[in-house]
């Protein structure tokens, strides 16, 4: 079998790039070792929070996140119109809260950092925070409101991207693990699966936390990506008035969804691909959630799960061509996979179509890790 562009990995990143390539009239085939969208994309809470989740010394991630947010509204509108599916895109904004004097001091330092980068944030007194979200704890000592931060239902997003990719003409093979990446004379030649060998002009590796494990990929270009486990759980909301905004503390986030779930997460664990839901992980999240929003104590737990963030050495994605001609990477998004989806899809597909590296992804060249 022959293909023009092969994509390995059927999460939001691989499906998003594939959809945009298929829209541009390119022949694209996607290989997914399991069911498309059932790993990190399915597990994600769907936070779109470049302002609230900004981290010191990660300015390039902040700029890329803001660029992706600029694209998000149009991206979602196009996706929903094309597929007829909804992705529960919510634009109510986010609140960061502190519950102790020390947390308030840390929040103030972050607030000053946000202001220095011209983010539209507002400092809140405890009373002002509880006026916005009356269910917040009486122990709130300060808050920061950020209206540019949104959220989405990641499971609906990945279902819509899968439908859009197939409808646009993309070929999808699920339950098809790659057994070998084929390199010939120093360039990409194709891949081998248990069923067939596929020759192709280009390969896009978008396999998330599994990107560095592909057999046959030379060590010189093997992406330094590892799994960072996150445990989450969801409770059933008593009604839309219970919580309207995304709420963050130093220990967790709490995100209300339109289907009546409130998603609470997530742990950060260097545990390899261990899928156990642990008592300690859930206890940590439950206690932190109760301290921030006491009303969750009475709510029924409807689901627990975990996922594996693809973490890179510098917490930034790898986007672009590797040192091997024809092998491109779109992985290592760590905690920002859902946030970065539109920008990754738009600019990686543009690179693959036009052959020039768009400015927004230039800081994320995979070759920054090459010897």
Image: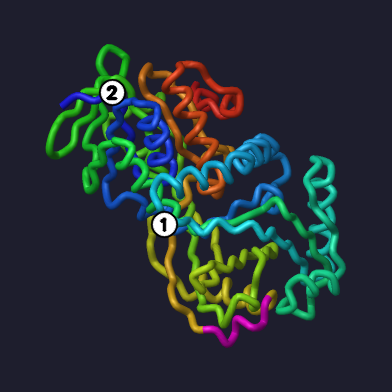
Of 108 and 152, which appears nearest the observer? 152
Q: Is residue 21 left or right of residue 117?
A: left
Of 195 and 73, which appears nearest the observer? 73
Determine which quarter of the picture holds residue 359.
top right
Q: Name which residue lies at 43% across and 57% down.
A: 156
How far from the left and from the top, in percent, is residue 59? 70, 37
Residue 271 in view (yes/no): no
How far from the left and from the top, in percent, is residue 77? 52, 46
Which quadrant of the figure contains the N terminus?
Answer: top left
Check the image and report above or below for 46 versus 276.
above
How far from the left and from the top, in percent, is residue 36? 32, 49
How far from the left and from the top, in percent, is residue 241? 65, 77
Check the image and report above or below for 268 versus 56.
below
Does the magenta-highlighted stretch encompass residue 213? no
Q: Which span is picked out in magenta?
A: 293-299
Q: Name which residue lies at 83% across and 67% down.
A: 142
Determine which quarter of the picture holds residue 71.
top right
* Dot label at residue 42: 1
Of 238 and 276, which appears nearest the observer? 238
- How far apart marks 1 and 2 lie (CA) works out to 28 Å
Q: Name which residue lies at 73% across and 44% down.
A: 56
Label 2: how many Cα within 10 Å (few below 14, some 14–19, many 20+)? few
* Dot label at residue 13: none
* Dot label at residue 4: 2
Q: Is residue 190 left or right of residue 53?
A: left
Residue 285 in view (yes/no): yes
Of 304 and 210, which appears nearest the observer? 304
Q: Earlier in the sequence, mark 1 or mark 2?
A: 2
Label 1 sits on a secondary structure element that is: helix
Label 2 sits on a secondary structure element that is: strand
Helix, strand or loop: magenta stretch: helix
């Amino acid at each position: 079998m022959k293909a023009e562009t092969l994509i390995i990995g059927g999460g939001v990143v691989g499906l998003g790039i594939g959809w945009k390539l298929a829209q541009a009239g390119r022949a694209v085939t996607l290989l997914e070792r399991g069911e498309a969208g059932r790993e990190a994309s399915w597990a994600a809470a769907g936070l779109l929070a470049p302002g609230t989740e900004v981290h010191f010394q990660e300015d390039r991630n902040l700029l890329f996140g803001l660029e992706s947010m600029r694209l998000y509204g149009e991206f979602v509108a196009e996706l929903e119109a094309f597929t007829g599916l909804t992705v529960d895109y919510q634009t109510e904004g986010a609140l960061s809260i502190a519950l102790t004097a020390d947390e308030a001091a840390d929040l103030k330092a972050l607030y000053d950092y946000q202001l220095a980068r011209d983010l539209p944030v507002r400092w809140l007194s405890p009373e002002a925070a509880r006026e916005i979200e009356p269910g917040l704890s009486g122990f709130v000592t300060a808050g920061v409101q950020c209206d540019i931060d949104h959220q989405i239902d990641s499971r609906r997003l990945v279902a819509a991207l899968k439908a859009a990719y197939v409808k646009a003409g993309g070929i999808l093979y699920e339950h098809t693990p790659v057994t070998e990446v084929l390199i010939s004379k120093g360039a990409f030649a194709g891949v081998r699966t248990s069923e067939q060998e596929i020759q192709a002009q280009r390969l896009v590796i978008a396999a998330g936390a599994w990107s560095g494990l592909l057999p046959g990929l030379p060590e010189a270009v093997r992406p330094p990506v590892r799994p960072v486990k996150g445990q989450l759980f969801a409770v059933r909301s008593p009604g839309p008035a219970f919580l309207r905004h995304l709420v963050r503390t130093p220990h967790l986030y709490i995100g209300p969804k339109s289907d009546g779930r409130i998603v609470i997460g997530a742990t950060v664990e260097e545990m390899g691909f261990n899928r156990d839901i642990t008592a300690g992980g859930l206890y940590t999240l439950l206690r932190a959630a109760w301290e921030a929003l006491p009303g969750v104590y009475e709510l029924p737990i409807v689901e627990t799960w975990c996922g594996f963030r693809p973490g890179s050495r510098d917490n930034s994605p790898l986007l672009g061509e590797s040192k091997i001609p024809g092998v491109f990477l779109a992985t290592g998004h760590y905690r920002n996979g859902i946030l970065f989806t539109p920008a990754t899809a738009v600019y990686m597909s543009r690179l693959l179509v036009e052959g020039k590296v768009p400015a927004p992804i230039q800081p994320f060249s995979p070759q920054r890790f090459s010897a």
